[in-house]
Image (cartoon, grey):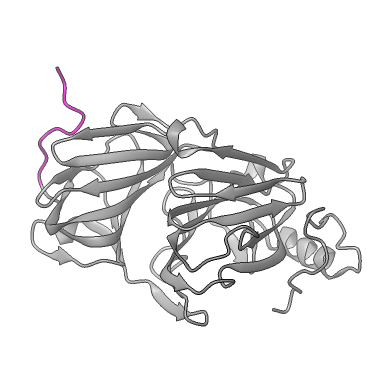
Amino acid sequence: MTTPFPEATLTASDDLATRIIPRARDLGGFEVRRALPAPQRQLVGPFIFFDQMGPAQFAAGQGIDVRPHPHIGLATVTYLFEGRIRHRDSLGTTQDIEPGAVNWMTAGRGITHSERLPDDLTGAHSMSGIQTWVALPKDQEERDPSFSHTPAAALPVIEDKGVSVRMILGSAYGITAPVETASETLYGDVVLAPGAVLPLPDNHEDRGIYVVEGSVSLADKDVPPSQMLVFGEGPGAVQAGPEGARLMLFGGAVLDGPRHIWWNFVASSKEMIEAAKEDWKKPDHGRFELPPHDKDEFIPIDS
């Protein structure tokens, strides 16, 4: 019987394609660390934006409060470890995102959404998670927007040799997430017991990890939390430190060319971004409708 996590040789630091230390910023007592886009690397597979949110503690009545804003040319994924956020979009969707579940929102030619503190979350609470944007292939940049929700219980999990992998998007180690993506995508939530070894999957062009908690070791170097590693071609592996580790495994097929990114817009041409900017500036926002259940305010383009 073939094990899903075969023996593997640890990756040496010289074999890394990129090592990224995120830029941290304080949003009023709530820290966000942005790893992508970075000066060293714009994309890993189709991933063009990668933020670690928190962990943060909020008093009663406080929390995430992002007014309606537009997107084009991407799909968003918010994956929580703790907390709850209420998503509303211009398609009429109202859907809370909870730990382990997936809200996959495809912007295509244009969508707006808000991210708010749920009305029924009235007490003190904590929040932490990862927010990512996945750039769409050129032939899907102008597609109709869409939204799908996948509960945590529907995502496959595999456990072996002190390694647990929950597939959020795509396939690895013989398991496949049920979320329909726009291109070949790899995204997994990995928990490693102390000293456990994670072999890198060999069925994707681009492979990266982001260390959320604990630490991992390469063949010749230790990697602390809140760092991103992008690997070169060939086999490889990382090993959890003495306290174990939690990391995000991500990547996929190399995208069909670089992308322009400005504010909340991603596109293969500057002209597409300029057209989106002009629409959002219009009194009626042009192609962009506000969420029907959250349309009393919005983020202006110069914010």
State whether residue 154 appears in this view: yes
On the image, the x and y values in percent for residue 190 come to 29, 46
Compared with 237, 117 (above or below) is below
| Residue sitting nearer the eye, 190 or 170 | 190
Q: Which part of the image, by quadrant, shows the C terminus?
A: bottom right
* Residue 6 covered by magenta stretch: yes
Q: Residue at x 56, y 69 (%)?
A: 63
- Relative to 73, does residue 179 appear above or below in the rendering? above
Residue at image coords 26%, 66%: 225
**Dividing the picture into quarters, in which one does residue 181 lie?**
top right
Left/right placement of residue 220 relative to residue 34 reads: left
Residue segment shown in magenta: 1-9
The residue drawn where x is 12% and y is 58% is 241
Q: Is residue 259 magenta?
A: no
In the picture, measured across the screen, residue 38 lies left or right of residue 201, that is right
Position of residue 43 measured from the top left corner of the image (x, y, whole percent): 45, 56
Would you say residue 235 is visible in this rendering? no
As drawn, is 146 to the left or to the right of 6?
Answer: right
Q: Position of residue 23 (x, y in %)?
A: 41, 76
The kind of secondary structure the magenta stretch mainly shows is loop
Please, which residue is most extreme toward the front here? 123
